[in-house]
Structures are given as structure tokens and as C-alpha cells.
Image (spheres, rainbow, N blue to C red):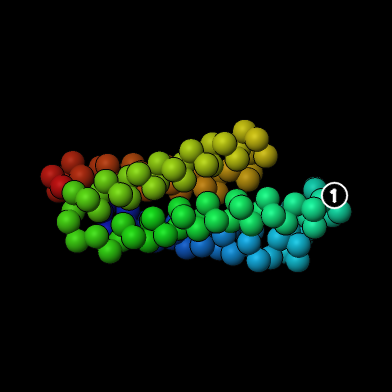
């Protein structure tokens, strides 16, 4: 179960590296295709806002990736739990402030990974 939780942590980290790249470097090129309900003229004026969001997603990605390299099981659990919690909160906020479909790709995997991580801790005693 822990292995599955850590695989999810890795996938969520990869997702957030992608989101960071998208927001920081592809906002005006890919953004209008992805967010087709937003007026196209809003992408250029919001490029700095998107880049700012992107750096926060990069922090989440790095924190999750960092947790995978921690050897001590207790600290690996703590750091992964912390950053998965951040991702879950970001998913809730995105679901409320943008639209449900924007937040769910962050919220659902983070909650599943949190549940697996917590369940695996009970079994291993880490």
C-alpha cells in the first residue's frame, strides 16, 4: 500500500510540474485551448498572474518529489503528508473559485494518496 501511495505522490508531483510549466511558460499559447470558456484577450494581460501561480505549483511539485528521496520513513511520511495536504487544499480552492473541473484533478488524487499513505502508516508503524 505504501508503494502505491508513493507512486501516486510521484504522479501528483509530475502533474504539478506540468501545471507549473503550463502556467509559467505556455499560458498564452496553450491557455486559450485549455480554458476555452475564458475570453482569449484575457491571457496576455494575465501572464504575470499565471506565472505567479506556476511558481506555487512548482513548489508543490518539488516538495512532493523531495518526499520520495527521504530515507527516514517517519520524515518521508510527514513531508509527503504535508505537501499532499497543500495540494488537496489547492484543489478545494480551485473547485470553489474557478470551477469544479479545475480543482478535481488535484483534489481527488491527493485525497486518494493521503488515504493510502495514512493506511500504510498504520500497517508499517512508520
Q: Could you say where residue 1 lies in the image, as x and y percent from the top left?
A: 26, 52
Dividing the picture into quadrants, the one containing residue 51 is bottom right
Q: Position of residue 95 (x, y in %)?
A: 60, 37
In the foreground, 26 or 96: 26
Report whether 98 appears left or right of 20.
right
Q: Is residue 30 above or below residue 46?
A: below
Asked whether, in this view, residue 48 is left or right of residue 72, the answer is right
Residue 90 locus on image (x, y percent) = 52, 42
Q: Classify mark 1: helix, strand or loop.
A: loop
* x and y percentages locating residue 86 in the rendered image: 44, 43
User: Which residue: 61% across, 52% down?
Assistant: 52
Q: Quadrant of residue 44?
A: bottom right
In the image, is residue 48 above or below residue 30? Answer: above
The residue located at (33%, 45%) in the rendering is: 81
Count of numbered labels shown in the rendering: 1
Q: Between residue 46 and residue 36, name the one nearer to us.
A: 46
Residue drawn 43% across the image and 46% down it: 110
* Other residues around mark 1 within 10 Å, as few (<14) / some (14–19) / many (≥20): few
- The answer to which image quadrant residue 32 occupies is bottom right
Q: Residue furthest left?
A: 125
Residue 26 falls left or right of residue 61: right
Which residue was labeled with disc 1? 39
Residue 116 seen: no
- Residue at 69%, 65% in the rendered image: 26
Does the image show residue 97? yes
Amino acid at each position: 500500500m505504501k508503494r502505491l501511495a508513493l507512486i501516486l505522490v510521484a504522479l501528483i508531483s509530475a502533474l504539478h510540474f506540468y501545471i507549473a510549466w503550463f502556467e509559467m511558460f505556455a499560458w498564452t499559447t496553450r491557455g486559450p485551448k485549455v480554458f476555452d470558456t475564458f475570453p482569449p484577450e484575457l491571457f496576455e494581460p494575465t501572464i504575470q498572474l499565471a506565472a505567479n501561480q506556476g511558481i506555487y505549483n512548482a513548489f508543490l511539485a518539488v516538495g512532493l518529489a523531495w518526499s520520495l528521496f527521504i530515507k527516514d520513513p517517519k520524515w518521508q511520511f510527514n513531508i509527503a503528508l504535508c505537501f499532499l495536504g497543500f495540494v488537496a487544499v489547492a484543489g478545494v480552492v480551485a473547485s470553489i473559485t474557478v470551477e469544479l473541473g479545475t480543482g478535481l484533478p488535484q483534489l481527488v488524487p491527493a485525497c486518494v494518496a493521503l488515504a493510502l499513505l495514512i493506511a500504510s502508516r498504520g500497517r508499517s508503524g512508520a
